[in-house]
Image: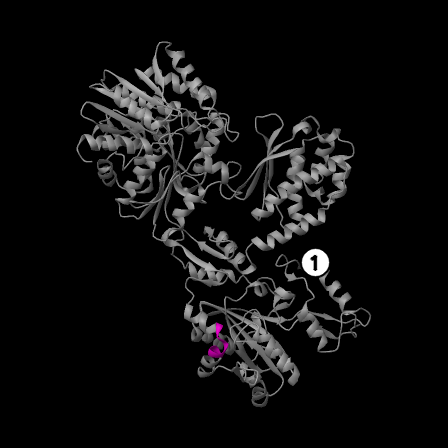
Amino acid sequence: MKIIDIKALRGPNYWSNYRKKLIVMKLDLEELEQRPTNVIDGFSERLEAMFPSMKTHRCSKNHEGGFFERVKEGTWMGHVIEHIALEIQTLAGMECGFGRTRGTGTEGVYNVVFSYMEEKVGIYAAKAAVAIAESLITNTFYDLESDIKTMREIREQTRFGPSTGSIVDEAIARDIPYIRLNGESLVQLGYGVNQVRFRATMTDRTSSIAVDLASNKDETKRMLQEAAIPVANGMCISKETEVAEVITKVGFPLVFKPLDGNHGKGASINVKTEEAAYEAFHHAKKYSRKIIVEKFITGYDFRVLVINHKFIAAALREPAHVVGDGISTIQQLIDNENLDPRRGYGHENVLTEITIDKETMDQLAKFNYTLDTILPEDEKCYLKGTANLSTGGTSTDVTDMMHPDNIFICERISRVIGLDICGIDIMGQNLSEPMIKTGAVVLEVNAAPGFRMHLAPAKGLPRNVAAPVIDMLYPTGKSCRIPIIAVTGTNGKTTTTRLIAHIVKNNGHRVGFTTSDGIYVQNTMLTKGDTTGPVSAEFVLRDPTVDFAVLETARGGILRAGLGFSKCDVAVVTNIQEDHMGLSDINTLKDMANVKAVVAKSVKRTGYAVLNADNQYTVGIANQVDCNVAYFSLDENNSVVVEHCKKGGIAAIYEHGFVTIKKGEWKFRVQKASAIPLTFGGTVKFMISNVLAATLATYVYGFSIEDIRTCLDTFIPSAAQTPGRMNIFDFKEYKVLIDFAHNPEGFNGIKEFLSTIDSPMKIGIITGTGDRRDEDIRNLGRISAEMFDHIIIRQDKFLRGREADDIVRLLVEGIQGHDPNKSYEYVPKEVEALKHAFTLAKPGTYIVALSDVITNAIDLVQSYLDKERGLE
C-alpha cells in the first residue's frame, strides 16, 4: 500500500458540514485491491486479537461486532484502516467515531476519511493505521503500545490545556466561533470587531497592572494588609545573610517562595531548621532574585476562584500523597495509586500520574524515608511540596461550604488587586467559618488561575467555571459574529464578490473581502495573490477593524482544508461549469456541485442561499440546504423562478432590460441594465448575471433597493476596480480586452460579447492549463476558432505536469477541429505575444488576451496606452 496524500480538514467540508475536524488520506491499495480481508489467511483473527475493543464498532451492520463480521465476509483494506485509525485514537484517550472510505474513480485508490480531536495525532494515526494493517497482513509483530504512548505525548504537546479548553468548549456550546492564534493557548473568540481574545485564563479585559501586582507577592501582600485583609506574617529577602534575620523575626516553621514565581515552582513549605532554611533559600533563588519568607500556617490549602468580581468556586487542595498499609513500600504505593483509572498522562484524566523526581526525594528525605520504606498503616506521606494538580495533587470541591463573610473578602480582594479572573490561595482550618474567627490567611493572589481543580475535582461537585468567563466576555445582547456573505461557483465569483463588497462598503460598513487577486479591507489590498481559501477567510475574520466580511470561496480551499468560517448569513453560488474537472477526485459536474454546496450548507437557518436558476446543478443545491433560498435568472420565465415566486419566494430577474427583484408576484425594478456600468451597456450577459447575484444577495441580507441602485451606478469596471474582468483599453486605432476567462464557459461568455462588436479583425491570445482534461483544452481551441480571425497561442506558464508542446498540440487540435484553415501562430512568451499582436493591429482591430493570470498583461497594455497618450 502507498499513501498518496494526507489532508487535515478544519471546517465545514465536502465530507461533512457538521464534523469539521477530519483527516482525508488518499491511499493506493496496490495489489491489495485484489485481496479483500476474507482471502488473507488469519487476518480477521489477528485483527480481533490486537483490537478486542473494536467489538463496539457497529459498521453498516448496525449492531455490536458488526465490523468484525464485515471483515470475515470480506472488505477492502481502506475500510479496515479507517477503523484502525479511529480505534487507536480512542485507545490513546481521544474518542473519535466518524469514518468513511470511498473510491476516487481510480482503481485501487481510496479516500480514507476519519475524525480526529488533535490534528497532529490524526495525521500520525493515519500513517500508523497503514503500518498496523500491513503488519496484520504479513503476521509480523507491531508495537501498538508505542504508538499509543506517542499519540498521547503529541496530544499533550498540541492540545489546549484544561483551562483554555474549557473556555473554548463553553464557547462552542454557545455557538461562539473561535480561532486558535498560536500553537499554545492564545485564542480569539468571535469575529472581526466583535472578537475577544484570551490566553489560558487571562482575557483582553485583564489589567496588566493587576497582573504585575499579582506577580509581585510582596506588593500584593502589602496592598492586602492595607485593605485589612488577613495575610501571613513574613518579609521579603534577597541575600543569604538575611535568612538568619527572618528566622529571628518570623520564627519557625517557615515557607520560602520566589517573589514572582508561579505554579509552586521554587517553593518550600514547613521549613523547621536553620539548615533547611538555607536550602530553601537557595532553591527559591533559582526562580527569583527576591524571596518571600512567611510563617507556615498549619491548616488546609484552599483555592477560591473569583470571576468578574463574583465568587464562583472553591476547592480544597492536597499535594500528591500515598497512605500506608503497613505492607507495601512507598514505591509500590505510588505504583498502585497510578493504577487509579482517574489518573492519566498529563491532563487527559481528572488526576495526573504521580511522577518521582528530585522534589519527591527531598520530601521523603525530610522524614528519613526512601522509596523502599514500608509506610506504616494509615500514615499519609506527602510526595510533593505543593498541591498542584499537574504534579499529582488532588482537589475537593467546597464551593457550597463557603461562608458569606469569606465570599465578601474574596470578592473584595479581586477588586483590590484589579483582576477580572482571580485565584486566591487561603490557608486555614476551613472556609465554612469566617477567616477572622479561624485565623485563616491569604497566601497568594493569582492571575491566570488554573480551572482544572474546579472542572474535575477528585471529590465533590464539578463546577462549570468557564461559563461565567463567557458571560463576562459576551454579556447578554453582545454579538460574537459579523455578517458574512460567501461567494462560490465556477465563473463570476470575483466580480460578484467585489460588487457585493462595494455595496456593503457604501452602506456604512468596514468591509473585509477576499478574492482571487488578494485580500482587501475597505479599499486597501493587504495581501496579493489568490486568496480564496480558508486561511484568507480567517485573515479577514481575525481583523479587529472589520465589521462585515465578503468571502470568495473556491473549490481548492474547500477540498484542501474545508471552510475558514463555521457559518455565514448569505451564500451565493454563481454557476457550476466544467472547470478543474478530474482534479482532487472531482470527476463530474455532480461532484463539483457537492463541493460548492458546502458553502450553501453553511448558511445559518435564517439566512439565504442565493442560487442561479439558469444552472441545473446550482438549482439542485436547494435540496441540500437548511435555510431560505432565493434564485436569480436571466429569464423571467424560468420555471424554477416562476414556481418559487408563486410560493412567495424572492428572486432577481432580468426582464425587459431591467435588473428586477421579484417578491412573490410583485416586481421591484432596481435599475436598467444598460445604465449599470458593469454590464457594458447591457451587452455582456454574464456580467448581468453577476449583477443579479450581487443585487439579490445584498437585498436578502437587508439593504434597500435604493441603496443597491446607487451602488450599481457607481461600480465602474476597470483594471483597478475589477482587474482581469472585461478590462477594455481604448487605443486610437484599436482596442484591447483583457479577461480572466480560462475555461470553456468563460470563453463562451467572451464569444457572446464579441458577437456584438463590429471589427474587421479580432485577434485572440490564448493559453491552456496543464492540469485540465484533454477535452477541456481542445474546447478552448475550438471556441477560440469560432470567435477570432487570428489566434496567437502562448504557453510559458501553467504547465502543471505537462509539456508546453502537449498543451499547444491540444489547442491546435481544437482550432483545426472547427476550421482547418483558421489562421494561428505560436509565440511562447506572454509579453512577446502581446507585443506581436500590437504589430498585427490595423484600424478597428480588437485584440483579446485570455488567461487565468492577467497582471503582466494589464501592466504591459497600460504602459503602451500611457505612451500613446504621452503620459510616459
The answer to whether residue 216 is magenta is yes
**Residue lying furthest top:** 821
- Provide the secondary structure element on which disc 1 rests: loop
**Residue lying furthest bottom:** 248
Query: Is residue 162 rendered to the left or right of residue 757?
Result: right
Location of residue 842 with respect to 184 vertically, above or below: above
Location of residue 846 with respect to 725 vertically, above or below: above
Residue 668 shows in the view: no
Residue depicted at 48% across the width and 32% down the height = 594
Label 1 neighbour load within 10 Å: few <14, some 14-19, many 20+: few
Quadrant where the image shows the N terminus? top right
Q: Position of residue 4 (x, y in %)?
A: 59, 34
- The way the protein has been coloured in the rendering is one colour
Quadrant where the image shows the C terminus? top left
Residue 388 shows in the view: yes
Residue 109 found in image quarter: top right
Q: Amino acid at mark 1?
A: Pro
Location of residue 587 with respect to 208 vertically, above or below: above
Residue 209 found in image quarter: bottom left
Q: Position of residue 744 (x, y in %)?
A: 39, 22
Query: Is residue 262 rendered to the left or right of residue 88?
Result: left
The answer to whether residue 796 is magenta is no
The residue nearer to you, when weighing 117 against 251, is 251
Residue 399 found in image quarter: bottom right
User: Range of the magenta residues?
Assistant: 215-220
Q: Position of residue 261 (x, y in %)?
A: 54, 72
Residue depicted at 72% across the width and 42% down the height = 55
Q: Residue beneath label 1, please?
A: 341
Q: Main secondary structure of the magenta part?
A: helix
Q: Position of residue 731 (x, y in %)?
A: 20, 26
Residue depicted at 45% across the width and 40% down the height = 602
